[in-house]
């Protein structure tokens, strides 16, 4: 996947939940729960271990900002936070993204093939 057809490089400014100089928070197009977002670096980079210290700190800051905003908007009971790195489950993530998935009391979170779960 090149930057030209990468959904994390080519996003609509209208969709942004939060942004800083190095990263952005966007809605997850294949949402697993209400308020499922991803934090992704602005630079097209595949691995968490390839980002700069500034990018890492920026992403963590936005992750906390996203959590605070999602708590205000949806009042979830908690969050599932995770990401894949490298060739995982016969799929390679071309652009690093960290999922922040709100969890709600009484609702089961059904992880899918993106997380290595087969039904």
Image: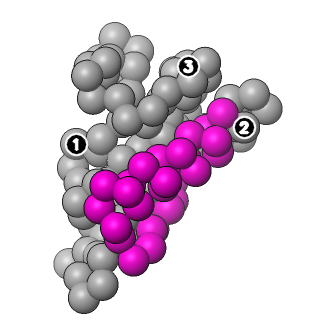
Mark 2 neighbour density, 10 Å: few (under 14) some (14–19) many (20 or more): some
Visible residue check, residue 97: no
Sequence-first tag of 1 and 2: 1
Report the number of numbered marks. 3
Q: Is residue 69 magenta?
A: yes
Q: Residue furthest front?
A: 72
Q: Earlier in the sequence, mark 1 or mark 3?
A: 1
Query: Residue furthest toward the right?
Result: 53
Judged from the image, the secondary structure of the residue bearing numbered disc 1 is: loop
Residue 26 lies in quadrant: top left
Give how far across and how far down residue 109 sits, in percent.
29, 76
Q: Secondary structure at mark 3?
A: loop
Quarter of the image with the C terminus is bottom left
* Residue span colored magenta: 58-83
Which numbered disc, 2 or 3, marks the residue that appears first in the sequence? 3
Q: Nearer the viewer, residue 53 or 88?
A: 53
Up-down relation of residue 104 to residue 21 (above or below): below
Give the labeled residue for mark 3.
Answer: 43
Q: Nearer the viewer, residue 71 or 24?
A: 71
Q: Which residue is mark 2?
A: 57
Classified by dominant secondary structure, the portion drawn in magenta counts as helix
Residue 50 percent coordinates (x, y):
70, 32
The residue sitting at 27% across, 29% down in the picture is 15
Closest to the camera, between mark 1 and mark 2, is 2
Seen in the picture, residue 22 relative to 56 is either above or below; the reply is above
Query: Could you say which disc has been placed on residue 29 in the image?
Result: 1
- Determine the CA span between mark 2 and mark 3: 14 Å
* Number of residues whose C-alpha sits closer than 10 Å to that of mark 3, classed few (under 14), some (14–19) or many (20 or more): some
Give the answer, above or below, for where 7 lies relative to 93: above
Crowd tier of the residue under label 1, counting other residues whose Cα lies within 10 Å: few below 14, some 14–19, many 20 or above? few
Secondary structure under the numbered disc 2 in the rendered image:
helix
């Amino acid at each position: 996947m090149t930057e030209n057809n990468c959904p994390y490089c080519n996003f609509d400014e209208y969709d942004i939940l939060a942004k800083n100089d190095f990263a952005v928070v966007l809605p997850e197009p294949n949402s697993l729960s209400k308020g499922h977002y991803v934090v992704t670096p602005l630079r097209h980079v595949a691995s968490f271990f390839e980002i700069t210290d500034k990018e890492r700190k920026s992403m963590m800051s936005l992750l906390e900002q996203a959590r605070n905003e999602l708590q205000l908007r949806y009042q979830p009971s908690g969050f599932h936070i995770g990401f894949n790195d490298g060739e995982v489950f016969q799929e390679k993530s071309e652009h690093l993204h960290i999922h922040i998935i709100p969890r709600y009391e009484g609702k089961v979170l059904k992880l899918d093939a993106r997380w290595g779960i087969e039904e």
